[in-house]
Amino acid sequence: ATALNRLGEFDSAISIYRPLIKQGYNSEDYYMNLGVSYFEKGDLDSALFYFKKITVPSIKLYNNLADSYIQKGQVYKGLTNIEKALKLSDEGVNKRLLKAVSYNLKGEAYEKLEKYDEALRFYQRSLMEAVFEFNDTSIFSNPTSKLLTTSNYQLFNFLVSKSEAFDKVYRMTGERKMLKGALDTYEAAIKVSDFIAKYFDNDDARIFHNTIVLPTYQKALNFVFYAYKQT
């Protein structure tokens, strides 16, 4: 079921998890994985149903609840769960990555609220948490792929979130600093994807490239064409 989730075969994964739970295997890990499967296929109500069955608080749980609520448009419920996640975070590589996810979700929440300055600051904070020895608070600064990170895959996702926010603000305002911010951040994300392609020769890297990276290339190209027409 876990492998099917990674391949994007969410219905097949669900068809394995649900019978296990009906048979009495009420592991909270199954609830978490089943919730993730429903989230990924876009069934947010079912995702929340299974996430809420989990009784042991964790950063991952609160992040998943927050993400589900944000995608449903219930942004303030999402923010409440993000704050719960951040209160549980402390030192350690795994928790540092989860904390970075929390800040990235907080950026998404503020972007939904059309508070783009705050959104960009939280996206920047997610990068600072994800990358060791990167402490630049300027939203116009990005880490390089040469720096040690908790997860190259998540670093790519965080950079994409930030670049898309710049992209959106530039289209609304036409400010050249937002244009530069979008171009620089898209470029930083693409460099991370190139690093993954070069050094990670496995199924996860290939799935990531096909499902996540290629659509981002298209978004970056669309933005470049849009910006060219404006200048």
Image (cartoon, rainbow, N blue to C red):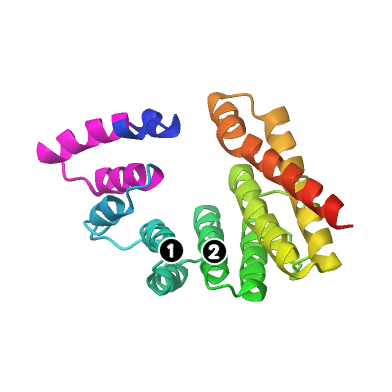
User: Is 34 covered by the magenta stretch?
Assistant: yes
Q: Residues within 10 Å of mark 1 (few under 14, many from 20)?
A: many
> Which three-letter amino acid code belongs to the residue tagged 1?
Ile
Is residue 27 shown left or right of residue 199?
left
Can you name the residue that lies furthest to the left here?
23
In the structure shown, which secondary structural element does the residue marked by tag 1 occupy? helix
Residue that appears at 68% across and 61% down: 168
Residue depicted at x 51% and y 62%: 105
Q: Which residues are magenta?
A: 12-40
**187 versus 89 height, above or below:** above
The residue carrying mark 2 is 108
> Is residue 127 found left or right of 98 in the rendered image?
right
Q: Is residue 231 above or below residue 8?
A: below
Q: Indicate the quadrant where residue 197 lies.
A: top right
Q: Are marks 1 and 2 in contact (CB under 8 Å)?
A: yes
Quarter of the C terminus within the rendering: bottom right
Q: CA distance from mark 1 to mark 2?
A: 8 Å
Residue under pointer 1: 70
What amino acid is labelled 2 in the image? Glu
| Res 1 quadrant in image | top left
Secondary structure of the residue carrying tag 2 is helix
